[in-house]
Image: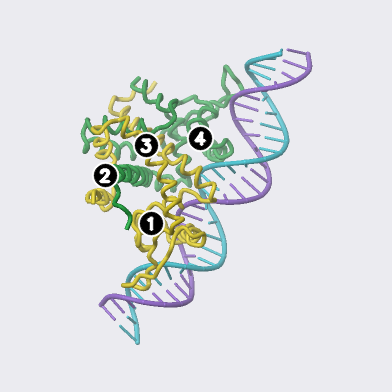
Chain colours: A yellow, B green, C purple, D cyan
DNA sequence: GATTTTATGTCAGACATGTTGACTTATTCT
DNA sequence: AGAATAAGTCAACATGTCTGACATAAAATC
C-alpha cells in the first residue's frame, strides 16, 4: 500500500474539491435559466461584464474573458441581434464598438445574477464576517494574474 | 442615473467575481497540460475522482460529475483505451465496472493535481490559517447539495 | 421462475463553446 | 504614406455537453 497522505496533502485536496463542487453548484442554476433563452454560460459572462462595465470596448471584454474574438463574436452577435446588448461607435475612437446592456439586457442580467447573489449572500450569512474575510483573502491569492487582482482593490468605489 | 449599489451588493458582486476569476485561473494551467495529451478538463475530472476513490462504480462517478452517462462514456472510453483507467467487474455485483487508475493514470493524476496543489498551497500560505478556515466555511456554504457537503465532514480520515 | 429494475454500454444526432488561420474594413498613429 | 489597431467575417475543426432510443447482463422482486 502507498503511504497515507499527510495532513497538508489532505488539506490541499479538500481545497481543490471545494473549488470544484463550489463552482459546479454556483453555475448550475443560472445555466438552467439561460437554457430557456437558448443561451449558455458564455452569454452570461458577456452580459455580466458588460453590465458591470457599461461602455467597455470589445477588446477590453476579450481581455477579461480570455477567449478569441471569433468565439466572442458569435455570442456577442446573438446578444446584439436579440436586443440584449447595444453597440455604439466610440466618440474618441470611432473604430471602437462600445458595449452596454439594453433595458432587456439589464433585466436579464438582474435575473441571472440574482440567483448567484442569493447563493453567495446565504453562504456569507451562514459563514459569518470573519470567514468572508478569509474567503476573500484565499480567493485573491488563488488568482494568478496580478492585473486581475487589482480589480478588487479599488472596487469599493 | 441609477442609484449606487449598496455596500452589501458590492460585497456580493465581489464574491461572484472572485469565484469567476479564481476558477478560471485554477483550471488554466492544467487545461494547457491536458491539451498535450489531446485531453480536456473532463478527462482531468475523471482522473481526479477515480484517483480519489479507487474502485468506484460508473454510477458513483456520474453522481459526482453530474453529467450524463453518454457524456462520460466518451471521455472514460478514451481514458480506458489509452491505458490511464482500468475497469474490472465488481465481485459483489458483476454488472458494475469498478474504476481505478493504472500506473500511467496515477502518474498523470499526480502531474495534473500537483499544479493545482501548488496553487492552493501558495494561496493558503499567503492568506494564513485563519483565512483558510474562513475560505472553507464559505465554500462549504456555497455548495448546495447536502450530500456533497458531507464529503468534507469525515474527510480528515 | 417470470418479471422488473438496475448498471452499463452504444449509436445517432444535435448544440454550445472554444480553437486556428486568413482576410477585410475603417480608423488612428507615426 | 505606411504601419498599427479595433473590429468583423468566413471556414474548418475539436471538445464537451445534451436527448433519445435501444441492447445486454445481472440483480432484485413478486
Residue at figure coordinates x 51%, y 51% from the top left? A39
Residue A143 vs residue A150, the one in the foreground: A150
- How far apart are the two marked residues, 3 and 1, measured between alpha carbons? 25 Å
Is B27 or A117 nearer to us in this picture?
A117
Work out whether residue B148 or residue B95 is closer to the camera in this orientation and state it: B148
Mark 3 or mark 1, whichever is nearer to me: 1
**Residues flagged by tags 2 and 3 on a common chain:** no
**A17 left or right of B68 in image:** left
Residue occupied by mark 3: A19
Q: In the image, which is nearer the foreground, mark 4 or mark 1?
A: 1
**Is the C-beta separation of discs 4 and 2 under 8 Å?**
no
Residue mark closest to the camera, 2 vs 1: 2
Marks 4/2 same chain: yes
Residue carrying label 1: A50
- Label 4 sits on a secondary structure element that is loop
Residue at 26 percent of width and 42 percent of height? A141
Q: Looking at the picture, do discs 2 and 1 lie on one chain? A: no
Which secondary structure, mark 1?
helix
**How many labels were placed on the picture?**
4
Of the numbered discs 3 and 1, the one sitting upstream in the chain is 3
Q: Nearer the viewer, mark 4 or mark 2?
A: 2
User: What's the distance in space between the residues labelled 2 and 3, CA to CA?
Assistant: 26 Å
Tag of residue B66: 4
Amino acid at each position: 500500500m502507498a503511504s497515507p497522505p499527510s495532513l497538508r496533502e489532505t488539506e490541499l485536496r479538500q481545497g481543490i474539491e471545494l473549488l470544484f463542487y463550489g463552482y459546479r453548484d454556483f453555475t448550475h442554476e443560472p445555466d438552467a435559466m439561460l437554457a430557456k433563452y437558448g443561451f449558455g454560460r458564455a452569454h452570461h459572462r458577456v452580459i455580466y461584464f458588460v453590465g458591470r462595465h457599461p461602455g467597455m470596448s470589445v477588446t477590453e471584454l476579450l481581455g477579461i474573458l480570455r477567449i478569441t474574438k471569433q468565439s466572442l463574436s458569435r455570442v456577442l452577435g446573438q446578444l446584439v441581434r436579440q436586443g440584449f446588448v447595444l453597440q455604439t461607435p466610440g466618440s474618441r475612437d470611432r473604430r471602437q464598438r462600445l458595449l452596454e446592456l439594453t433595458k432587456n439586457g439589464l433585466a436579464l442580467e438582474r435575473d441571472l445574477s440574482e440567483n448567484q447573489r442569493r447563493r453567495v449572500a446565504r453562504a456569507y450569512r451562514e459563514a459569518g464576517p470573519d470567514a468572508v474575510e478569509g474567503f476573500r483573502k484565499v480567493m485573491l491569492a488563488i488568482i494568478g494574474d496580478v492585473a486581475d487582482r487589482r480589480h478588487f482593490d479599488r472596487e469599493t468605489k
